């Protein structure tokens, strides 16, 4: 039995799995500790991955060499590219997953990763000496020692679930909460608070009148989460279904608000504003007579459905009576009611951008313990924390993603710079460089970085090199090939496109809003032949990449120039160079925030709420800039 490791990861949720696999892949002897080996990467809420901005994070995880995209593709039972009617900066992949298959595949990934070991137990305390983490102690009385520890406990730290008046201690249904760690770290000086999230009722599909719902099919094209060409959807694809609440449903919910833990004072913690419970919806949007709901299958063959849009902590009888007013649910049977859960989190401004804590060297936080919500946000943090834990014990340089490199970089910078006043969820609006952070080019942005540290494999890197060469060759062909007017003008007349008066470069035609490369290939033989030269398995992906690069070239270049200007402030180191207490020309509020967060650079300081442009100018003067 081995008790000494390089890195210990606490918790095998989405953050913990990515942290452990990244650490081990980088060569660190890694131990993953989880309460239940049968609940690895459990999808405790929606059995889906991705969505607006979240899908970009998953593609970034995959591009760096993480595993979430691979597991999602192989467990997917529906895939959709959201926001296709908008520009590519807004396109976001989303997949419904087979919940049990997702967990099974993740366990297989972990057990096939060299240097990674697992232990089933609960961690009661950390071993800390002289400001450095040394290991953990478990409920079984075992001590494991390590040079770095990654805490990814999710909702388990002092977790408390609510269904109406009934309260149950636990991290999620049928799983015990974890105690001791919060109290220990609070005594050590960490600032903690409580957050709340919730999940909807689970419905037995055999009791649903499907004729009263609208079918929502998935996409059936080349898009996936993983950039690896051999990773495909393997399971039977299933539709989701749309339905709506009604005034009678709202009346029952409203008349029972005094029994809701959210409204009777039973829950005092911070809840999500962007994913409200059904009782919050009927209060906040009192003028609405209906709210859209989605019935989403939990697996390839199961009858269990997740009712998206109906999160609730109301008593069981109220939830059922309200659902029975919806025509599709007149004979409803459920597997379990919706519930709310309260749990501990730590103020993320107590972290560096590596996700290492400022108070304890070698201790990293990732996931919901940092005040975030969502599988994807957790996995992105876990990947970065696992990378940095391994790099630290190996004496290597830390790994940090900038805001113009990745949504993961935006996420972490927001957390450590601004903190949270509600569960943090990623939106495209949080990223000032959305055109640079598209889902289609995450591999172009991040695979070289993952390869440089040893996380992305040689195979993955060479696939990227080949893809880039083929994309650029197609773009060069478009720049140099001339299209004669007589070749396309008859077709243009049919589709209402302005005719050519003379030959033009193919590149100019691709720039036209109504035209695209594949449409043009149907009428330009040389272009069709050029496309045929591309790899069969990745042909459509390469064509799409080339087309986006052509159509949005001006926007991309302009945003890159803005990012480069901001990078000048990123290069000006600030941490440890100024005694903020002595700077009387800066407001008291600004001095307090600068001292507490201790920003690493002037650019990070500029993003702290309450720090004004004049404050930044004063800092630059003090630095002699």
Image (cartoon, rainbow, N blue to C red):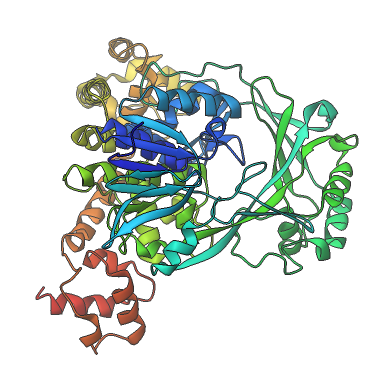
Q: 559 and 609: which one is in front?
A: 609
Q: Is residue 207 above or below residue 376?
A: above
**Dividing the image into 4 quarters, which one contains the C terminus?**
bottom left
Residue 236: % across, % down: 61, 16
Residue 529: % across, % down: 30, 9
Residue 91: % across, % down: 46, 38
Residue 425: % across, % down: 50, 52
Q: 253 and 117: which one is in front?
A: 117
Q: How many marks?
A: 0
In the orientation shown, which residue stands out farthest toward the left? 624
409 relative position to 40: left or right: left
Q: Residue 60's quadrant in the figure?
A: top left
388 relative position to 278: left or right: left
Q: Which residue: 47% across, 43% down?
A: 11
In the orientation shown, which residue stands out farthest toward the bottom? 584
The answer to whether residue 133 is seen in the rendering is yes
Q: 206 and 15: which one is in front?
A: 15
The answer to whether residue 502 is seen in the rendering is no
Q: Which residue: 19% across, 80% down?
A: 579
Q: Residue 115's quadrant in the figure?
A: top left
Q: Which residue: 36% across, 61% down?
A: 416
Q: Residue 606's quadrant in the figure?
A: bottom left
**Dividing the image into 4 quarters, which one contains the N terminus?**
top left
Q: Is residue 608 above or below residue 361?
A: below
Q: Which residue: 27% across, 30% down?
A: 456
């Amino acid at each position: 039995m081995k008790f000494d490791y390089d890195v210990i990861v606490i918790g095998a949720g989405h953050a913990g799995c990515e942290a452990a696999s990244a650490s081990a892949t980088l060569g660190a002897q890694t131990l993953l500790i989880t309460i239940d080996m049968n609940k690895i990467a459990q999808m405790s809420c929606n059995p889906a991955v991705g969505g607006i901005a979240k899908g970009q994070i998953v593609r970034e995880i995959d591009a760096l060499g993480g595993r979430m995209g691979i597991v999602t593709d192989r467990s997917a039972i529906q895939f959709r590219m959201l926001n296709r009617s908008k520009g590519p900066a807004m396109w976001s992949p989303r997949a419904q997953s087979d919940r049990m298959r997702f967990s099974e595949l993740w366990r297989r990934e972990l057990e096939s990763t060299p240097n990674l070991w697992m232990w089933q137990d609960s961690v009661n305390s950390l071993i800390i000496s002289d400001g450095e983490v040394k290991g953990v102690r478990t409920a079984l009385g075992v001590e494991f020692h390590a040079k770095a520890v990654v805490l990814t406990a999710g909702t388990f730290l002092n977790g408390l679930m609510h269904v109406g008046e009934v309260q149950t201690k636990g991290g999620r249904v049928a799983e015990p909460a974890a105690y001791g760690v919060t109290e220990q770290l609070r005594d050590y000086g960490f600032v903690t608070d409580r957050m709340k999230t919730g999940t909807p009722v689970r419905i037995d599909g055999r009791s649903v009148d499907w004729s009263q719902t609208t079918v929502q099919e998935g996409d059936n094209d080349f898009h996936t989460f993983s950039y690896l060409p051999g990773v495909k959807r393997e399971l039977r694809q299933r539709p989701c279904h749309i339905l709506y609440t009604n005034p009678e449903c709202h009346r029952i919910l409203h008349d029972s608000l005094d029994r809701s833990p959210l409204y009777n004072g039973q829950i005092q913690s911070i809840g999500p504003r962007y994913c409200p419970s059904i009782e919050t919806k009927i209060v906040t949007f009192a003028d609405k007579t209906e709210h859209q709901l989605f019935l989403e299958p939990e697996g390839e063959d199961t009858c269990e459905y997740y009712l998206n849009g109906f999160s609730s902590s109301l008593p069981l009888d109220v939830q059922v009576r309200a659902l029975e007013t919806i025509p599709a649910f007149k004979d409803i049977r459920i597997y379990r009611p919706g519930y709310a859960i309260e749990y501990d989190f730590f103020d993320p401004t107590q972290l560096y951008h590596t996700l290492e804590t400022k108070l304890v060297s070698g201790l990293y936080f990732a996931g919901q313990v940092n005040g975030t919500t969502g599988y994807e946000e957790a996995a992105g943090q876990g990947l970065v924390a696992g990378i940095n834990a391994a790099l630290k014990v190996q004496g290597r340089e830390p790994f940090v993603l900038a805001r113009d490199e990745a949504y993961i970089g935006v996420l972490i910078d927001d957390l450590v710079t601004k903190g949270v006043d509600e569960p943090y969820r990623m939106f495209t609006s949080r990223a000032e460089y959305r055109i640079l952070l598209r889902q289609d080019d995450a591999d172009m942005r991040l695979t070289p970085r993952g390869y440089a540290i040893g996380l992305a494999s040689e195979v993955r890197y060479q696939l990227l090199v080949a893809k880039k060469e083929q994309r650029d060759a197609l773009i060069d062909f478009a720049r140099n090939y001339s299209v004669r007017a007589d070749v396309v003008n008859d077709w243009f007349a049919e589709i209402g496109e302005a005719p050519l008066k003379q030959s033009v470069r193919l590149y100019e035609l691709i720039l036209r809003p109504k035209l695209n490369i594949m449409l043009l290939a149907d009428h330009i033989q040389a272009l069709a032949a050029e496309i045929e030269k591309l790899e069969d398995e990745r042909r459509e992906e390469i064509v799409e990449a080339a087309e986006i690069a052509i159509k949005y070239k001006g926007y991309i270049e302009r945003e890159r120039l803005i990012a480069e200007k901001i990078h000048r402030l990123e290069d000006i180191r600030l941490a440890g160079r100024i005694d903020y207490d002595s700077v009387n020309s800066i407001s008291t509020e600004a001095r307090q925030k600068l001292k507490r967060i201790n920003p690493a650079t002037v650019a990070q300081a500029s993003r702290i709420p309450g720090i004004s442009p004049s404050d930044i100018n004063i800092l630059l003067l003090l630095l002699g800039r």
